Structure formats: structure tokens, C-alpha cells
Amino acid sequence: MKSPRSEAEGSRFAKEIGRKEGRLLVSRRSGHPRISSIGAIGIIGWTVTLPMLAGIALGRWIDGIAGGHWSFTVMLMIGGLFLGCATAWGWVRRRLDLGKETRKDSAMEVEGGAKGEGGSHDPGEAP
């Protein structure tokens, strides 16, 4: 026969396992493991670099044809830098907004699981 204390500890343990299981399932469904943060740095880098390199290439071509006093290479490089930074900023902003929605949804799912609304079940029971 189990003591009331061990039953309470078992119930607490089962709830903790249910919460952790819910968080794990939500993170798997979201498809954003921690390694994706490293990939995000690469995406941001290329998002800034490619428009800047395109500006340099186009500016060199225009300078070769037109010549003149003004350096189109520098102007288009700076324009490409601004375009790349704006694009990267928009991408980061969308990703942050998506992260907020995902955290909100996961919090609701974890709370629902803790209340017994589609969360975990007792391992001894049939699902």
C-alpha cells in the first residue's frame, strides 16, 4: 500500500513529465531546433552581402562604360548595403513575430496538457 505522500509525489512527477513532454512535442512540431539559430546568422549575412556584391558588379560595369567623375561602384555598393540591411531586418522581424506566436501557442498547449485537456496520460492506462 502506498502512502499519501508517495502518491502526491507521483502525481507531481507525472504532471512535470506531462509538461516537459508537451514542450518537447511543440518544439519538434515548430521545426526550429537550436541549430537553426546558427543558420539564421548565415542567412542574414548572405542577405546583406549579395545585394552589396551585385551593386559593386553593376557599379564597375557602369563605371567601365560611362567613366566620369562619380564612382557608381561606391554608390551602388552603399545602395546594395542599405537594401540588404532592410531585407535582413524584415526577415528577422518576421522570424521574431513567428517566435512570439509559437511561444503563445505552446504555452496554451502546455497549460491544456496540465489540465488534462489532450495532454499526457497515465502510463498504466490505455491511450
Image (tube, grey):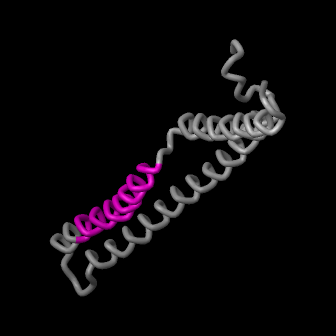
Quadrant for the N terminus, please. top right
Position of 9 with respect to 71 (left or right) is right
Quadrant for the C terminus, please. top right
Residue 108: image x %, image y %?
76, 41
The quadrant in which residue 70 appears is bottom left
- Vertical arrangement, residue 106 with respect to residue 1, above or below: below
Residue 81: image x %, image y %?
38, 70
Residue 40: image x %, image y %?
42, 55
Please report the bounds of the magenta region as a residue range: 34-59
- Vertical arrangement, residue 54 with respect to residue 99, above or below: below
The chief SS type of the magenta part is helix
- Vertical arrangement, residue 88 with respect to residue 102, above or below: below
Closer-to-camera residue (29/110): 110
Position of 87 with respect to 77 (left or right) is right
Write the residue at 52% across / 59% down.
Answer: 92
Write the residue at 25% across / 65% down.
Answer: 58
Closer-to-camera residue (71/1): 1
Position of 121 with respect to 20 (left or right) is right
Closer-to-camera residue (110/58): 110
How many dots with numbers? 0
Residue placed furthest toward the front = 1
Residue placed furthest toward the bottom = 69
Residue 56, magenta (yes or no): yes
Closer-to-camera residue (91/13): 13
Residue 37: image x %, image y %?
44, 55
Residue 52, magenta (yes or no): yes
Write the residue at 73% across / 35% down.
Answer: 10
The quadrant in which residue 14 appears is top right
Write the residue at 35% across / 57% down.
Answer: 42
Residue placed furthest toward the top = 126
